Image: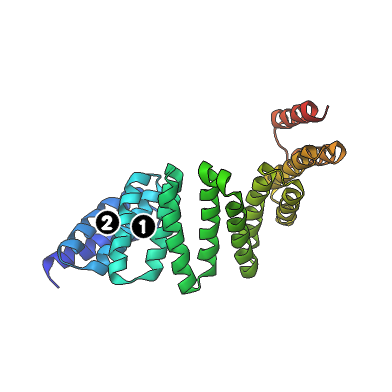
Amino acid sequence: MNEHEVSANIYFSRGKEGFLKGDFQRCIKDLIYAQEMFSSIGKKDMSAETLYMLATSYYQINQFTQAKQMFSLAITRFKELKNLTRIGECALKLGEIYRSEGNFKRSKQFLAEAIEIYTQLGDLEKLADTWRELANAFETSLDESSSHPSRIINAYKTAISYYKKLKFLDKKAETEFDLGHVMLNQSKFNEAIKYFSDSLSFFTKSKDSENIVTALIMIGRAHFKMDNKSKARNYMYKAIEKMRKAEYSPEKISQLKQSVFAMLG
């Protein structure tokens, strides 16, 4: 082991220690030094792993431009190494970042790549997460949501089916709630009520007050859109009562009361 490799390993070990502790801001400098040294001496596997930790660190501190650059370098290196697991992880993160930037074409390309890899690997959780992210990309892309609205629903339903199979009930409920919003926006009110109700059932069991209140309000809105004011009022007042029990501020309770009065009279 030559001097450069020894120094690279020292920087890598120190950077990795900070990374594992969640000290992302401070570990970046050591990881940069390690990556440059590993790259210069042709240690592609260590260079790739260091790039991945750098990318993740930048992502965690919301420096997405740098994260995108590092994930792009990392995915190229992992492809040379044929490391499917890391290729999938990089593709998923790049899909998320490009979606947040509004570059839906690139987002969908990377997410489709991640889905292909996770299908090969049989990683159902990552498949579910990627389908959920793809649904989000479809939903926030105006061209996609207006021209192909069914793609959003199908992607969310695919994610839900995987979460159900895995018995990841928290992620299943969160995704059902997201799908409820989509159904509401597409004026599919009965379907919206079904998905909001399914998510409400989990939130109630897990005593998640904030999401219980939101789900009750959304079910109320769906009934209002169907011109069923009696049921709408019932769910809205259930939300207000839940807010009282959860000790929400009087201001927030008052705001909801005013909204209900303005909506229902």
Which type of secondary structure does the marked residue at label 1 adopt? helix
Q: Position of residue 211 (x, y in %)?
A: 68, 47
Q: Position of residue 238 (x, y in %)?
A: 81, 41
Residue type for callout 1: Phe
Residue depicted at x 74% and y 29%: 259
Residue depicted at x 55% and y 53%: 135
Q: Which circle's residue, 1 or 2, is located before the other in the chain?
A: 1
Residue depicted at x 45% and y 51%: 96
Q: Is residue 115 above or below residue 57?
A: below
**Total numbered labels placed on residues in the image:** 2
Horizontal side of residue 160 vs 229, given as left or right: left
| Residue 31, disc | 2
Q: Quadrant of residue 252?
A: top right
Q: In front: 41, or 264?
A: 264
Q: Is residue 209 above or below residue 256?
A: below
Horizontal side of residue 170 vs 10, given as left or right: right
Horizontal side of residue 110 vs 220, given as left or right: left
* Spatial separation of the CA atoms under disc 1 and disc 2: 9 Å
